[in-house]
Amino acid sequence: MIAADRLRHFAAVDWSGAVGQRQRGIAVAICGTDGAPALVRPGHVWSRAEVLDWLNDGLPVDTLVGLDLGIALPFVDRAAYFPGWTESPPDARALWALVDRLCADDADLSAGSFVAHEQASRHFRRHGGRVGDLFQPGRGRLRATEHAQAAAGLNPCSNLNLVGAAQVGKSSLTGMRVLHRLPRTVAIWPFDPVPAAGPVVVEIYTALAAIAAGRRKGRAKMRTAADLDTALIAIGSPPSDLADPVSDHQCDALLTAAWLRTVAHDPRSWRPAGMTREVAATEGWTFGVG
């Protein structure tokens, strides 16, 4: 758990696993303990490397940062990330290291070499009808937190699925390269103890913020400044006063930054019922999922 006055800033990063150096799908927003959230570097088209630099050097003191990606892969259902592979890592940090090592030559913090690896590829569903022989039929394997998301009425997708508009597998794998490269002075929940000072990174699901603001499941995306401001007001935040055009990525980041401010001091956010020690070490958890 975290002290009520410990966190002073709340940031959200809408992430992208797409190919290319700069990603219009990345948006970064931040707010303080009051006031409206604001975009970081508005108008800028971010690269993943720039987000990593910002996490390393640009964060205000005592910031809670939410990354919109899967922080790990399923483990507890089969007691392994990649059953049958001798290099299957024992925990999340080892998983991040493996992804980053196998993708060392991939530009722009991408992860194509990992999903094409002879052993790893057996567990993924990829474009072109390429389905690994160990990919679980249907929606694919889910983490414990994703089962909790489904129980809450959300529609999670397996991080081992790399196909379709709803997939988050590419974002998750590229995000793991970023997580591996963060200094240990940046705590990553729930793998690290929450320190008495300094930044804390958590996994977020932006639809949670949208639903908390009264958006309907399946219509969580906002693409106008008016819709964004309505949602911000619904969770107790001042409106953004942005003018159109705004992207759904910017709206997601802005609303989720403000939402983090509302849930960060709730003990239930830090101690979800389904998060055992094994889950916390291997799969992580989505912040704010009960």
Image: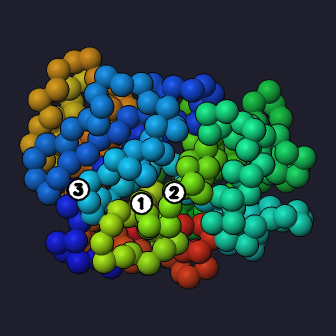
Q: Is residue 134 above or below residue 190?
A: above
Question: In this image, 84 relative to 63: left or right?
Answer: right
Q: Quadrant of the N terminus?
A: bottom left
Q: Is residue 246 above or below residue 166?
A: above
Query: Which residue in the structure is indicated by mark 2?
Result: 182
Q: Amino acid at mark 3?
A: His
Residue at image point 80% right, 65% down: 88
Residue at image point 46% right, 37% down: 50
State yes or no: discs 2 and 1 in contact (Cβ < 8 Å).
yes
Q: Is residue 148 visible?
A: no
Disc 3 crowd, CA 10 A, few/some/many (<14, 14-19, 20+):
many
Question: In this image, 252 relative to 129: left or right?
Answer: left
Disc 1 crowd, CA 10 A, few/some/many (<14, 14-19, 20+):
many
Separation of residues labelled 2 and 3 (CA atoms)? 19 Å
Q: Earlier in the sequence, mark 3 or mark 1?
A: 3
For residue 201, the mark is 1
In front of the other: label 2 or label 1? 2
Q: Position of residue 244 (x, y in %)?
A: 22, 18
Disc 2 crowd, CA 10 A, few/some/many (<14, 14-19, 20+):
some
For residue 9, the mark is 3
Residue at image point 73% right, 44% down: 104
Q: Position of residue 229 (x, y in %)?
A: 16, 34
Q: Earlier in the sequence, mark 2 or mark 3?
A: 3
Separation of residues labelled 2 and 1 (CA atoms)? 10 Å
